[in-house]
Image (cartoon, grey):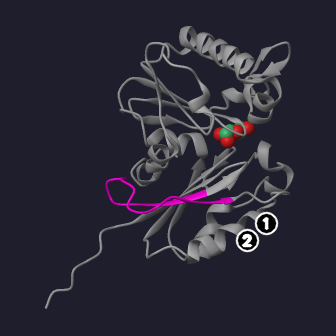
């Protein structure tokens, strides 16, 4: 008797400055289980982060491969920067191999905003993704192809302060919603005539704090939609 094969499952992990989230996806990139979340340990050195991920992996049902979004620059699975996780200890850390070893499954790691963007882009024209959370994540796609490691968040915008300095989560807590929203509006107004994008997507934990109506061509997405980008990593050669 033929045994029924379980459909391909991609476990997606989002490592954030505040939380570490996991969600299983089917072959189409649709969530097939609950999103679970644990707090990111502080200090957030590689060993401490992996110590949180390990039991989370063990608690998951069977999966075939792992996609990881990391809050910094990642090249071929190796971390170059991690501004919101203490940076230093992460530089040169081969996160892809580390998680592949823990999970015992093929693993791919890219930047967190880039992974989330794959979950929402249409794949046509110039599309930009901004994630407003602990830091400011940015990603750029041209006809669905990623332009890797665009770190707009670290570009100085005003009085020597970077985009991220102006709108990061701890700044929102300090300056309040009203001033923060003005800064977000400044960022959107600055980017529009530079990138002439077809669509810009806003995600991250603070996306819901931005007031409607959003400017033309701008849409909001939630964290689950973003994490559904985990499947796209396996079909895109431009990592
Ligand atoms: C990092 C980005 C990351 C963003 C959101 C920034 O500080 O430089 O790589 O996408 O935070 O986590």
Residue 40 % position (x, y): 73, 57
Identify the residue shown where x is 58% and y is 49%: 110
| Local crowd size for mark 1, using a 10 Å CA cut-off: few (<14), some (14–19), many (≥20) | few
For this view, does 195 lie left or right of residue 228?
right
Q: Secondary structure at mark 2?
A: helix
* Residue 90 visible in the snapshot: yes
Magenta region: which residues?
Answer: 21-38
Which corner quadrant of the image does residue 112 belong to? top right
Quarter of image, ligand 1: top right
Identify the residue shown where x is 75% and y is 29%: 172
Measured along the vertical axis of the image, is residue 110 above or below residue 191? below
Which of these two is toward me, 194 or 208? 208
Residue 24 % position (x, y): 44, 62
Residue 67 % position (x, y): 52, 58
* Residue 138 visible in the snapshot: no
Q: Are marks 1 and 2 in contact (CB under 8 Å)?
A: yes
Which of these two is toward me, 237 or 28? 28
Identify the residue shown where x is 74% and y is 35%: 169
Q: According to the image, label 1 marks what residue?
A: 48
Query: In the rendered view of the protein, which quadrant contains the N terminus?
Result: bottom left
Identify the residue shown where x is 70% and y is 44%: 72
Q: According to the image, label 2 marks what residue?
A: 51
Determine which of the numbered discs, if any, sits on residue 209 in the image: none
For this view, does 111 lie left or right of residue 35?
right
Residue 36 % position (x, y): 56, 61
Magenta span includes 36: yes
């Amino acid at each position: 008797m033929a045994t029924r094969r379980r459909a391909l499952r991609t476990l997606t992990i989002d490592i954030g400055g505040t939380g570490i989230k996991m969600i299983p996806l089917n072959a189409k990139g649709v969530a097939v289980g609950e999103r679970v979340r644990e707090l990111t340990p502080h200090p957030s050195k590689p060993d401490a982060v992996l110590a949180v991920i390990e039991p989370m992996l063990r608690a998951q049902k069977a999966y075939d491969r792992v996609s990881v979004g990391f809050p910094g620059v990642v090249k071929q699975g190796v971390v170059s920067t991690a501004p919101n996780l203490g940076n230093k200890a992460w530089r040169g850390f081969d996160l892809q191999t580390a998680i592949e070893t823990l999970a015992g499954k093929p693993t791919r790691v890219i930047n967190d905003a880039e992974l989330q963007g794959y979950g929402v882009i249409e794949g046509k024209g110039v599309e930009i993704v901004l994630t407003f959370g602990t830091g400011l994540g940015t990603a750029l796609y041209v006809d669905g192809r990623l332009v890797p490691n665009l770190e707009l968040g670290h570009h100085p915008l005003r009085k020597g302060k970077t985009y991220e300095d102006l709108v990061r989560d701890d700044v929102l807590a300090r300056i309040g919603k009203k001033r923060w929203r003005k800064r977000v509006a400044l960022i959107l107004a600055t980017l529009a005539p530079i990138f002439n994008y077809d669509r810009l997507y806003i995600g991250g934990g603070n996306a819901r704090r931005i007031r409607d109506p959003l400017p033309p061509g701008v849409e909001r997405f939630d964290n689950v939609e973003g994490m559904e980008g985990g499947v796209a990593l396996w079909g895109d050669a431009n990592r």
